[in-house]
Amino acid sequence: MTILVTGGAGFIGANFVYLELKEHPEDRIVCIDKLTYAGNLETLEEAMKYPNFRFEKMDICDREAVFQLFEEEKPDIVVNFAAESHVDRSIEDPGIFLQTNILGTQVLMDASRKYGVKRYHQVSTDEVYGDLPLDRPDLFFTEETPLKTSSPYSSSKAGADLLVNAYHRTFGLPTTISRCSNNYGPYQFPEKLIPLMIANALADKPLPVYGEGLNVRDWLYVEDHCKAIDLIIRDGKVGEVYNIGGHNEMKNIDIVKIICKALDKPESLITHVTDRKGHDMRYAIDPAKIHRELGWLPETMFKDGIQKTIQWYLDHKEWWERIISGEYQNYFEKMYGDRLKDAE
Ligand code: NAD
Ligand code: DAU
């Protein structure tokens, strides 16, 4: 089988590429990625050594290039990870989110229709369900929860999900969608909570916690997410949505404290800064369907996953130090400069 993976130079896509190369050596993996600020070819260095792996720098919105690639490779399965993925950036500049996340998805599905792919899988997010109140711990997102988004990012992902369902119903495209909670693990870009806090703590810099830090996220080790997608593309039912999550809800402030402790850094580095606009309070996935139908369960406990992740960042300083020494400095100043000054 040939599997086309988009966005494979990013965090989850790269972890998925490595899982597939390890678990399914009989398959060919073709990866396309635009290599935006979030894409990093260094991450795929090891993958490049595999004869059954091909990488092409490509924008999923580039219809001509995408169709040409489908013509050459005739993929059996398409897994679409490619996206603008950071909520804070979508609040600053929504346009590129609509472009890549919605129109790019359309291009991939048009090509998938024309070349008769056996499965088009859309990697979506729990953020399409909006958020849950902190005082209702009994509530969870199920696949039937209505879409109700908060940020331009989550709206663009919900828009793509609706389009995927439309292509399934109208054109019979064999689609599946997965909606996962927050991932953590190796190769995550240091703009996201966990790697940002690790990098800042190691440099004895302030740890910018939005608001009180009471917002809750449902954290899942990235490999568990990738294993769930692997199951869905092979055994999942066409036309279905699968929620993925580990029942591992944690407050942001507690995560940051765990990181301080693990790195032996003082909690006095924690700096409460102006909250994110429209900040979702709580995400909590009910993963009963994927467990019942496909037998999936998370394998990595948070206490082990966070240790492995911190160790990975300690062992791969050159990977993230190169990132934060470049354009990232301007990003950090723009997003956090005033907030940190206000917090003083
Ligand atoms: P990421 O930002 O680390 O990686 C995204 C990748 O997509 C990058 O390599 C980037 O270069 C590439 N890309 C962006 N625009 C592109 C375009 N137009 N054409 C081709 N490639 C393009 O993101 P991630 O955290 O790995 O997320 C991957 C997917 O998983 C996204 O669709 C995201 O919505 C979804 N998701 C993420 C999480 C999470 O916690 N990170 C949770 C649930 C779902
Ligand atoms: O739930 C899945 C989603 O998880 C994915 O769809 C997104 O692509 C992914 O980025 C992630 O979104 P979040 O907004 O939840 O992740 P982020 O790491 O940006 O923030 C996690 C929480 O930490 C959130 O409540 C905001 C807070 N935060 C984040 C940063 C970067 C801080 O307090 N300080 C920070 O500096």
Image: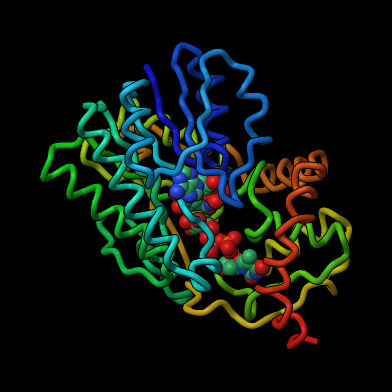
Residue pictured at 13% horizontal, 37% vertical: 172
Q: Is residue 108 visible?
A: yes
Q: Is residue 287 visible?
A: no
Is 303 above or below relative to 121?
below
Q: Locate the C terminus by quadrant.
A: bottom right
In front: 10, or 178? Answer: 10
Is 182 above or below relative to 109?
below
Q: In the picture, residue 206 is in which quadrant?
A: bottom right
Residue 338 coordinates in the image, percent (x, y): 71, 83
Residue pictured at 46% horizontal, 76% vertical: 135
User: For this view, does 180 lie left or right of residue 38?
Assistant: left
Residue pictured at 84% horizontal, 67% vertical: 205
Residue 107 coordinates in the image, percent (x, y): 30, 44
Marks counted in the figure total: 0
Residue 63 coordinates in the image, percent (x, y): 33, 41
User: For this view, does 237 lie left or right of residue 94?
Assistant: left
Residue 187 coordinates in the image, percent (x, y): 66, 43
Q: Quadrant of ligand 2?
A: bottom right
In front: 251, or 21? Answer: 21
In front: 223, or 27? Answer: 27
Is 122 above or below relative to 93?
above
Direction front: furthest residue: 64
Q: Locate the N terminus by quadrant.
A: top left
Is 35 above or below relative to 129?
above
In front: 221, or 292? Answer: 221
Residue pictured at 77% horizontal, 45% vertical: 313
* Structure colour scheme: rainbow
Q: In the picture, residue 317 is in which quadrant?
A: top right
